[in-house]
Amino acid sequence: MTASPWRGYELGSRTVSYTERDAILYALAVGAHPSDLDLVYEERLRVLPTFALTLAQWAPDALGSLGAFDVTTAVHGAQRLTVRAPLARAGEVVMGARVTEVWDKGSAAVFEIEVVSDRFVAAWSLFAPGCGGFGGARGPAAPPRPGEAGQPADRRLTVATHPGQAALYRLLGDRHPMHVDPEAAKAAGVARPFLHGLCTMAALTLPVAGALGAHPADLLELQGRFAAPAFPGDRLVAHCWSDGEKGVRFEASGPERTVISGGRARFGHG
């Protein structure tokens, strides 16, 4: 086996500051309702843990800017988030990042990027066409999906996205043109601009938390694979399977396809 030269690459550290306004804009971008005062009103504000992923977006962007892959064709394959401590209503976060692994998928490669801070640990998997074939390991297979074993879902939730959601979400830092520019989306192999995977996943955590009787700001762990793009305005359906107290496995589908598979979330008790 031949390891990629990017394996173990240190992306350095970064300090990112944010305000209450940023946290509120994020909550609105992922579907919080104006009546959710503890998510959209500074007097009662609790910061959604998934907001951390916008603060850590610099790391995958930095790897792309170094030429590890073609930023016009690489897509987000999967995401993990482990919460270590709640985010303050405003402040700054110090993070370090590195490339933990590069898997060889033949015609493509998957770059695993980990970002660590005292508040969270986040891991991106980026699928990069044209970067494989270097003789490395293919990586682990995806774990079995609960629906594949014929296990019936415990509950079914509907999540409505809105037409301007991708344009709004990109103001939080992920300004990749494929989410707003039709030509850039086509270059990435998608018919039209599509929702950020992280926006789709975060939007799902709101109703999932509600179904469990949890608060979305009490999220402790989240992961999922982005199986296909969701489009602004899609109505998503999430099938959920209980996974212990305050835990759930989920899969989400758009009008024609599964958009998130292998989803798992766990919440605290508030």
Image: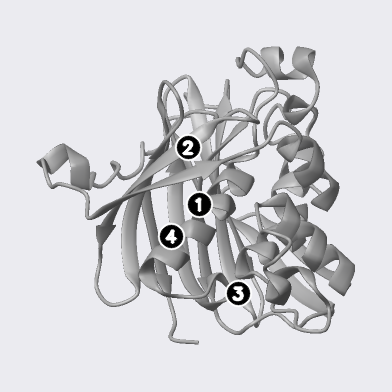
Q: Residue at x 42, y 20 (%)?
A: 256
Q: Determine whether label 1 and label 4 are within 8 Å by CB.
A: yes
Q: Amino acid at mark 3?
A: Phe
Report the Cα–Cα distance between label 1 and label 3: 20 Å
Element type at mark 4: helix
Report the Cα–Cα distance between label 2 and label 3: 28 Å
Q: Where residue 204 is drawn, which disc sits there? A: 1
- The image quarter containing residue 28 is bottom right
Residue 110, position as x, y percentages in the image:
50, 38
Which residue is tagged 4?
A: 208
First along the sequence among labels 1 and 2: 1
Residue 2, position as x, y percentages in the image:
44, 38
Residue 261 vs residue 115, the one in the foreground: 261
Element type at mark 3: strand
Q: Determine whether label 1 and label 3 are within 8 Å by CB.
A: no
Report the Cα–Cα distance between label 1 and label 2: 9 Å
Q: Amino acid at mark 1?
A: Leu
Report the Cα–Cα distance between label 3 and label 4: 21 Å
